[in-house]
Image (cartoon, helix red, strand yellow):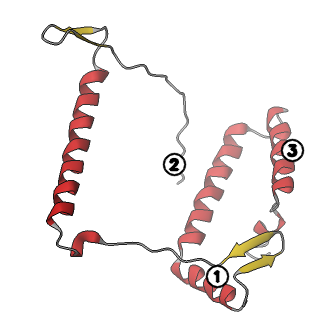
Amino acid sequence: MNALSSITILPVTKKERKSFVEKAKQEILSGIYNPLEIDIYLKGIEELIKEIRKDEEIKEAIFNEAEKYSEKDIDLQSAIISKTSRKTYDYSCCLDSTYNDLKLKESNLKAEIKEREGFLKVIKEPIFIDSTGEQINPPSYKTTDILSIKLK
């Protein structure tokens, strides 16, 4: 068995994926599979995909393959692959004092906001500011139970 043979049998189209998810859901909820074990597999697949897609040699091979097609949009199997470009700018070399001042203000504002949020988190009941007549209420929040999976 090749390393990628497992991937090539997975659904690709939106319709196939939707059907796959429904079947997986039925199998998990009916007790055929242990939901925790399936979640471990899903986490592993997620990490695996990230690692493959981040690999520079694989990225280069994919790009080289796309370059073999003359058209901008490649219709391949059940996908449209569009060749596009993305510009990224590095403003650190501009030596623009206005920009640098704004970035400093942004950084300071973010720090001030974080500090103020820390203050607001500890408020348990409304606070009244006598000098302004302002009422500051504690923030609302919701608690969500989650499971964190760390693969060995």
Q: CA distance from mark 2 to mark 3?
A: 26 Å
Judge by depth and name the residue closer to the eye, 118 or 93.
Answer: 93
Q: Residue 23, labelled with which disc?
A: 3
Write down the residue under mark 2: 150
Residue at 74 percent across and 38 percent down: it is 34
Q: Secondary structure beneath disc 2?
A: loop
Q: Secondary structure beneath disc 1?
A: helix
**Earlier sequence position, callout 2 versus callout 3:** 3
Task: Tell whether 93 sits left or right of 4.
Answer: left
Where residue 1 appears, as percent x and y from the top left, is 80, 75
Q: Residue 113, labelled with which disc?
A: none
Where residue 65 appears, as percent x and y from the top left, is 68, 87
Judge by depth and name the residue closer to the eye, 148 or 61.
Answer: 61
| Nearer mark to the viewer, of 1 and 3 | 1
Name the amino acid, label 2: Lys
Residue at 82 percent across and 60 percent down: it is 13
